[in-house]
Amino acid sequence: MALAAALGSCAPFVANHDSEVQFRTVRTPSGPLKLAVIESGQGRPILLLHGFATSSYTWHAILPELSKNHRVIAIDLRGFGASDKPLDDRYSIQDQTEAVQAFIEQENLRDLTVIGHSYGGGITLTLALNAAQEKKPRIRNIVLIDTIAYRQPIPIFFKLLQIPMVGDIGMTLVPPEIQAGQGLRLAYYDQDKISGQDVAEYANTLYSSAAKHALTKTIEQLIPENIDEIALRYKTIKLPTLIVWCQQDKVVPVVLGLRLHEEMRSSELALFTHCGHMPQEEKPEDTVAAIQAFLKRNAS
C-alpha cells in the first residue's frame, strides 16, 4: 500500500540535489572517467560509497550531520547516478575499486574514513585489503553497512537480471519507477518510509540506455568469482572497523554480518532492529549516532 502510494506520487518529483553536484575526472586503467561528487563540511575526510542501483542520494539523511565535523565526500560510482556510464564490461568490484582509489589519490585524501553500503561495502573491503599492502595507507578506518562480503544467494529480482535477454527485456519494458519501487520494497523493512521522492531519485537515471547497461553488467559481476579466496583475507585487515547491520535485511542476511564481525577482529558491531537493507535511509538517526561514536573512539 505504501509503495503504491509512493509510485503514484512520484511524478511531480525530480532529482533535487543536481545543483550540489560537481564533477571530477579521474584516470583509471580503462581511461578517463567523470565522477559526480557531492562535498560538504570541513575536517578529517569521510568518503561515502553507495550500494548497487543507488547513488549518492542514499546518504541524504546522514550527510548533513556528518559534515558538521568532517569533510564529507559522496561520489556516484562508475555507471550510477550522474557519473559516466561507459558501454563496456568494467563493472566489477575490482574495476570500481580502481576508480575510487584513483579518486582518493587525485584528491590527495589522507587520514580517511571510508563508509560503504552493500556493493559499496564490497569496494570498501577491497580498498582496506589494498591498504594493508601500502607503506603509508591513506585510509584511517572503515565503516561497513549491510555489506556484500561472502558468497550468498541473491534475490530473485537480481537473478532475473542475470539471465541473458530476460534482463535486457525487463530493463526495457518495466518502467523505471516500478524497478526503483520494487528495489526499495525489497530493501526496506518499514515500507511506509518509502517516499515518492525516494522512488523518483532512483528511477531518474534508469531512463538512459547507458544506465541500463551499467546495471546489467554490474549484476553479472556482483559477487566476484574468487570471493571465497578474498574472504579468507578479511582477518588480515587491521584498520579500525565499524560494521552496521539490520536484523531484518532480506538482501544480505544478518548472519553474514555476524560472521564478518567474528572474522574481523578489529571490528565493532552496531546491530539495529526493525530495519532492512538501508539503515542510512530507514534509521538515519541511529546510523549517524553509531558512526559518530565510532569516529570519536578512534579520533586519536
Image (tube, rainbow, N blue to C red):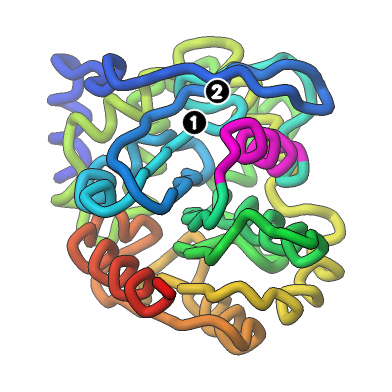
Image position of 297 with respect to 169: above or below = below
Tag 1, which secondary structure? Answer: loop
Residue 35: mark: 2
Taking the image as shown, residue 255 lies to the left or right of residue 288, namely right
Residue 177 screen position, x and y as percent: 33, 25
Q: Looking at the picture, which amino acid does disc 1 mark?
A: Asp
Q: In this view, which residue lies farthest toward the top? A: 208
Residue 292 screen position, x and y as percent: 29, 67
Task: Evaluate whether residue 162 shows in this view.
Answer: no
Of residues 146 and 141, which is closer to you in this image? 141
Residue drawn at 61 percent across, 18 percent down: 25
The first of marks 2 and 1 along the sequence is: 2
Of residues 14 and 241, which is closer to you in this image? 241
Q: Please state the extent of the stretch shown in magenta in the rendering.
A: 95-109
**Dot 2 surroundings within 10 Å: few (below 14), some, or many (20 or more)?**
many
Task: Evaluate whether residue 47 shows in this view.
Answer: yes
Q: Quadrant of residue 211?
A: top right
Residue drawn at 69 percent across, 16 percent down: 86
Tag 2, which secondary structure? Answer: strand
Residue 123 screen position, x and y as percent: 64, 51
Residue drawn at 41 percent across, 66 percent down: 249
Residue drawn at 68 percent across, 54 percent down: 127
- Asked if the magenta segment contains residue 101, the reply would be yes
Q: Mark 1 and mark 2 in contact (Cβ < 8 Å)? A: yes
What count of labels does the image hold? 2
Residue 158 screen position, x and y as percent: 58, 44
Residue 88: mark: none
Taking the image as shown, residue 118 lies to the left or right of residue 198, namely right
Q: Looking at the picture, which amino acid does disc 2 mark?
A: Leu
Give the residue pinned by disc 1: 76
